[in-house]
Image (cartoon, rainbow, N blue to C red):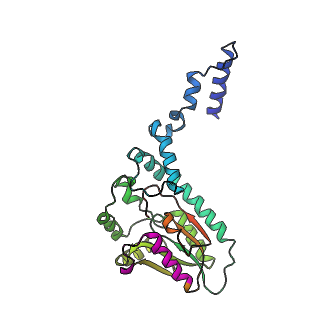
């Protein structure tokens, strides 16, 4: 309201200060429209904020394609997005849409109605790890990340945990399809329980024959195996497009936000 009042006042002053039919834009009006004003609460340099917002948009829509690191000038932007409540809000919006779709499914009594979840940045948040590793601005350190996985202390994404429980109550069989490796099974199960998850139908991890496969191929093959077993895959949730696309895709796929890293 204060912003609108200031804008009206500045416009009025500009019009009444000149007899000519020429609109003169005063410094006050320029300041009201400046990125300094719009993004002041984010504490991000105004010449980076718009660029980083658009960069994140192209990441989430997959228009940017393959990428390895977030732009260095967007580190503060990504940090702000992940920690200021915007990420949580976006995740909740995705979960709400997922549940709205799930409510349209007539779940049968044969136990073959399935929903697939990825794990990292879908059910579990690795934000405690990425806080100490540049929010995606540093080259991925597999050894350090595996050590973090071994600690089995990643918290649940609250909106995803709520969705997970709602789907289970509605009778969906829940499958966890992750890019983690088989040797991480015990730690992954331990972390899932620690974060509040339970009653999944199956945890699917990369085995020896899956090593080196692109995520899209690996996850498509695993979904096809479930279909061959007779499961009807109604929904699929993941933070990467490679969790969702390919073949044997779900009836509906739901992309969670993740501007920190990309998996092909």
Q: Is residue 231 left or right of residue 66?
A: right
Q: Quadrant of residue 18?
A: top right
Q: Which residue is drawn at 45% across and 72% down?
A: 178
Q: Quadrant of residue 230?
A: bottom right
Q: Please say whether residue 7 is one of the residues in the magenta stretch.
A: no
Q: Position of residue 122 (x, y in %)?
A: 49, 65
Vertical arrangement, residue 187 with respect to residue 65, above or below: below
Q: Where is residue 94 in the image (x, y as percent from the top left)?
A: 58, 61
For the residue pair 165 and 140, the one nearer the viewer reads as 140
Residue range (magenta): 207-227
Q: Residue at x 65, y 32 (%)?
A: 4
Q: Please say whether residue 221 is one of the residues in the magenta stretch.
A: yes
For the residue pair 193 and 248, the one nearer the viewer reads as 248
Which image quarter holds the C terminus? bottom left
Q: Where is residue 143 in the image (x, y as percent from the top left)?
A: 29, 66
As drawn, which residue projects farthest toward the top?
A: 19
As drawn, which residue projects farthest toward the left?
A: 143
Which SS type dominates the magenta stretch? helix
Can residue 36 be seen? yes
For the residue pair 252 and 63, the one nearer the viewer reads as 63
Q: Is residue 187 left or right of residue 241?
A: left
Q: How many marks?
A: 0
Can residue 198 be seen? no
Vertical arrangement, residue 243 with respect to residue 39, above or below: below
Q: Residue at x 50, y 37 (%)?
A: 40
Vertical arrangement, residue 41 with respect to residue 240, above or below: above
Q: Which residue is drawn at 61% across and 66% down?
A: 98
Q: Is residue 170 left or right of residue 216?
A: right
Which image quarter holds the N terminus? top right
Vertical arrangement, residue 10 with respect to residue 18, above or below: below
Q: Position of residue 60 (x, y in %)?
A: 52, 56
């Amino acid at each position: 309201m204060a912003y609108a009042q200031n804008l009206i006042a500045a416009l009025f002053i500009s019009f009444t200060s000149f007899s000519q039919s020429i609109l003169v834009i005063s410094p006050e009006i320029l300041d009201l429209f400046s990125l300094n004003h719009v993004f002041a609460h984010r504490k991000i340099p105004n010449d980076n904020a718009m660029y980083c917002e658009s960069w994140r948009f192209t990441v989430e829509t997959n228009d940017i394609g393959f990428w390895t690191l977030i732009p260095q000038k967007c580190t503060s932007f990504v940090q702000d997005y992940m920690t200021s409540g915007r990420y949580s809000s976006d995740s909740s919006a995705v979960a709400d849409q997922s549940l709205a779709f799930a409510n349209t499914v007539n779940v049968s009594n044969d136990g073959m109605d399935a929903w697939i979840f990825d794990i990292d940045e879908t059910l579990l948040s690795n934000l405690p790890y990425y806080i100490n590793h540049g929010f995606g601005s540093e080259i991925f350190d597999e050894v350090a990340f595996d050590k973090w996985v071994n600690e089995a202390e990643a918290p649940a994404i609250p909106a995803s945990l709520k969705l997970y429980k709602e789907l289970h109550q509605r009778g969906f069989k829940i499958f966890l399809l992750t890019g983690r490796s088989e040797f991480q099974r015990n730690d992954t199960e331990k972390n899932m329980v620690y974060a509040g998850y339970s009653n999944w139908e199956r945890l699917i991890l990369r085995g020896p024959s899956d090593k080196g496969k692109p995520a899209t191929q690996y996850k498509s093959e695993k979904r096809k195996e479930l279909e061959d077993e007779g499961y009807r895959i109604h929904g699929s949730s993941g933070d990467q497009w490679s969790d969702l696309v390919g073949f044997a895709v779900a009836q509906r796929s739901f992309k969670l936000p993740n501007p920190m890293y990309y998996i092909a």
